[in-house]
Image (cartoon, rainbow, N blue to C red):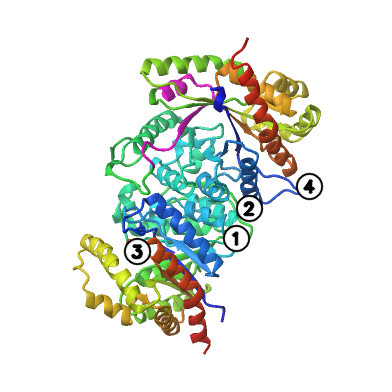
């Protein structure tokens, strides 16, 4: 596990600001993402993933299209999603998009399937959130079969049937790495195990160690299913700066209004500075100097048996200079330090 | 008059390598990216990729390939040819092309059409008998989305939208959008009604027979009070150093695919005389740079079009020959056509 601990970046295509505090346009933000992915590759990060959102200030509505641009701007970095909202997508269209991305990138495409915490895609594409489970289950079955078999006959309730269908362009044998993203639902964990797919834990608040139960459940379920051991990853938010103080002050400035907005929409408490500090110290925010963030990632890796960690580095209006600094420090300092820490102490003493 | 626009179109035909073996569909996609990069370097104005769902053609999501091209090019316009709107979702099509537009700093152009193939209907669960209503309604919604303001819409072909805002927004405020038409007068009128530019697919026979469509487009735009934009056209062809070489490379491979598709549509197998006649005065622009340039110039002049796109792949033409054709199109054919028309 420690040999190849992988560190990557996640973006939700959030609008950045420039050095003068000017908000970038949607299109400028899209091009910034391509530049940031290039930077991520140059500092040795393993992966660049984009989400899928349908709201103002987010520019990741066409994830595969964005990733295809990054594909020809880079050579080595793996390209994924975080997450693809499977329930409101058509698995056939997804197959087309990701087999094309895999072609354009010479085999670097990956995907994480999940729901995400935003639900805009349901009304936008004419789905009922009440059907979430059935949509996900059936579509996962189809997407996995399309990848594992070359010709598929399928019928279900969530899309039209397929009869001896072949799709083009053909994906590589066995398909692309397909992960399941979970936010805390044990049924989603069991589903990942049932399909023998790797597990991505989306931990966006609270003590991450509470997911240790999910990890145990997952590993036990894999064993019961007779499936081989699968990698486990974590996605969390954060920012790396030269010092802890700088990181804490910068993130607070941009994270606070976003959380206040979400708190209003979803009806939970607005953040206080105390809760914020606690979230950094013991919770799910990875905000700090390279040493602080590296230590925290290494701790999580041990506690949750991770082989992958993705940092979601963009938050609305965060200056692009801070975004770039996070990427540089994550690749140049955090990544080697995490690997070093895990090589010395792979598990807790 | 505005400068004539020259494009290259492909459906991502799976090519042969130097030993005559078919490459993978995935390699076929990377080949198209390389060809587009070369076309950009040589100053070709546009490339358009068609959407198909058949084993001969590797491109099923044009915009994903276009995005890959966008990041490696700086001038060439990036289009689809066509996006099969009837079996797609206008909201998703807008999002995908607005993203290509952002990556390319405004070079995206979506060409919406119904396509001449019908595989996408069963694949995405649509009924061919809804052919007209699907395109009609979805085009209407797409035109509304082009204003980049919150959209309220309801119809029979997708879920209703209530004040839905769609992202990303474009820098210009309007995504360039054409409608591709193969020969339906009703489609020509509809295009004029929406004030969109018209792209004619002329894939056989004398190009002159499309003159009435262009007249109809202009008359309809006049009647609706919309703008009649310069009309574009695309036709198949191939370019090599000599006429003989171009025909010998093209004909046997084109015949394979033409007969395979013809069998599905009830056409008799292609005969060499028909092909030669189409090369002589029809809609096959096959030959040396000089021959192809003269044929294009003649068509452009007769039809008064503002854009000509050459479908430069039809069948398993070898990769090296395709690159050579792109090179000859950019370095020789385009300047020659401009010279002829200026002269």
* Residue drawn at 52 percent across, 85 percent down: B339
Q: Do labels 1 and 2 touch, CB within 8 Å?
A: yes
Work out how far the residue at label 2 is from the one at label 3, CA to CA, in angstroms: 37 Å
Res. B56 image quadrant: bottom left
Work out how far the residue at label 3 is from the one at label 1, CA to CA, in angstroms: 32 Å
Disc 4 on helix, strand or loop?
loop
Q: Do labels 4 and 1 touch, CB within 8 Å?
A: no
**Circle 1 marks a residue in which chain?**
B
* Residue drawn at 62 percent across, 37 percent down: A44
Q: Do labels 3 and 4 touch, CB within 8 Å?
A: no
Work out how far the residue at label 1 is from the one at label 2, CA to CA, in angstroms: 9 Å
Residue that lies at the very extreme toward the front in this rendered image: B19
What residue sits right under mark 3 in the picture?
B317
**Circle 4 marks a residue in which chain?**
A
Over which residues does the magenta segment extend?
A172-193
What residue sits right under mark 4 in the picture?
A19
Nearer the viewer's eye, disc 2 or disc 4? 4
What residue sits right under mark 2 in the picture?
A27
**Circle 3 marks a residue in which chain?**
B
* Residue drawn at 77 percent across, 21 percent down: A274
């Amino acid at each position: 596990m420690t040999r190849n601990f992988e560190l990557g970046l996640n973006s939700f295509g959030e609008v950045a600001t420039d050095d003068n505090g000017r908000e970038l346009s949607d299109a400028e933000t899209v091009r910034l993402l391509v530049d940031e992915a290039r930077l991520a590759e140059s500092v040795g990060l393993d992966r660049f993933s984009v989400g899928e959102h349908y709201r103002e200030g987010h520019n990741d509505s066409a994830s595969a299209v964005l990733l295809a641009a990054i594909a020809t701007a880079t050579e080595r970095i793996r390209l994924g999603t975080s997450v693809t909202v499977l329930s409101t997508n058509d698995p056939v269209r997804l197959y087309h998009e990701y087999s094309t991305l895999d072609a354009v990138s010479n085999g670097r495409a990956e995907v994480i399937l999940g729901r995400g915490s935003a639900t805009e895609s349901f009304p936008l594409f004419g789905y009922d959130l009440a059907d979430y489970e059935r949509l996900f289950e059936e579509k996962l079955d189809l997407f996995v079969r399309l990848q594992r078999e070359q010709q598929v006959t399928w019928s279900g309730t969530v899309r039209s049937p397929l009869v001896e269908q072949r799709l083009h362009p053909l994906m590589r044998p066995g398909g692309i790495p397909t992960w399941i993203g979970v936010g805390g639902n044990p049924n989603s964990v069991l589903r990942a195990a049932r399909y023998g797919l790797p597990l991505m834990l989306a931990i966006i608040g609270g003590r991450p160690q509470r997911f240790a139960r999910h990890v145990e459940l997952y590993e036990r379920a894999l064993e019961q299913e007779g499936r081989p051991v699968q990698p486990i990853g974590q996605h969390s938010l954060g920012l790396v700066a030269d010092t802890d103080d700088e990181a804490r002050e910068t993130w607070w400035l941009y994270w606070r209004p976003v959380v206040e907005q979400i708190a209003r929409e979803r009806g939970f408490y607005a953040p206080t500075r105390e809760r914020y500090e606690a979230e950094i110290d013991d919770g799910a925010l990875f905000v700090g100097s390279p040493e602080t963030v590296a230590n925290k990632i290494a701790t999580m890796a041990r506690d949750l048996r991770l082989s992958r960690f993705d940092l979601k580095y963009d938050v609305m209006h965060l200056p692009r200079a801070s975004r770039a600094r996070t990427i540089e420090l994550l690749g140049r300092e955090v990544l080697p330090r995490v690997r070093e820490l895990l090589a010395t102490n792979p598990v807790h003493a | 008059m505005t400068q004539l626009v020259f494009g290259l179109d492909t459906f991502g035909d799976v090519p042969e390598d130097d030993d005559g073996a078919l490459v993978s569909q995935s390699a076929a996609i990377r080949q198209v990216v390389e060809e587009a990069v070369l076309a950009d370097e040589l100053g070709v104005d546009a490339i358009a990729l068609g959407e198909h769902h058949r084993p001969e053609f590797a491109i099923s999501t044009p915009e994903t390939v276009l995005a890959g091209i966008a990041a490696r090019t700086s001038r060439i316009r990036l289009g689809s040819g066509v996006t099969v709107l009837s079996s797609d979702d206008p909201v998703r099509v807008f999002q995908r092309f607005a993203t290509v537009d952002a990556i390319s700093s405004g070079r995206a152009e979506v060409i919406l059409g119904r396509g001449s193939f019908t595989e996408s209907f069963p694949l995405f669960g649509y009924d061919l008998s809804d052919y007209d209503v699907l395109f009609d309604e979805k085009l209407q919604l797409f035109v509304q989305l082009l204003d980049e303001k919150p959209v309220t819409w309801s119809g029979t072909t997708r879920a209703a939208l209530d004040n839905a805002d769609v992202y990303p927004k474009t820098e210009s405020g309007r995504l360039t959008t054409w409608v591709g038409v193969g020969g339906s007068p009703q489609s020509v009128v509809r295009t004029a009604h929406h004030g969109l530019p018209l792209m004619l697919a002329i894939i056989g026979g004398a190009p002159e027979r499309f003159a009435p469509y262009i007249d109809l487009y202009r008359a309809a735009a006049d009647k609706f009070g919309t703008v009649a934009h310069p009309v574009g056209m695309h036709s198949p062809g191939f370019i090599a150093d000599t006429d003989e070489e171009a025909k010998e490379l093209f004909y046997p491979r084109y015949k394979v695919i033409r007969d395979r598709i013809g069998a599905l549509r009830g056409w008799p197998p292609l005969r060499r005389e028909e092909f030669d006649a189409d090369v002589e005065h029809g809609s096959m622009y096959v030959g040396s740079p000089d021959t192809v340039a003269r044929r294009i110039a003649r068509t452009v002049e007769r039809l008064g079009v503002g854009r000509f796109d050459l479908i430069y792949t039809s069948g398993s033409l070898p990769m090296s020959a395709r690159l050579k054709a792109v090179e000859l199109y950019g370095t020789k054919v385009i300047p020659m056509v401009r010279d002829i028309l200026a002269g």
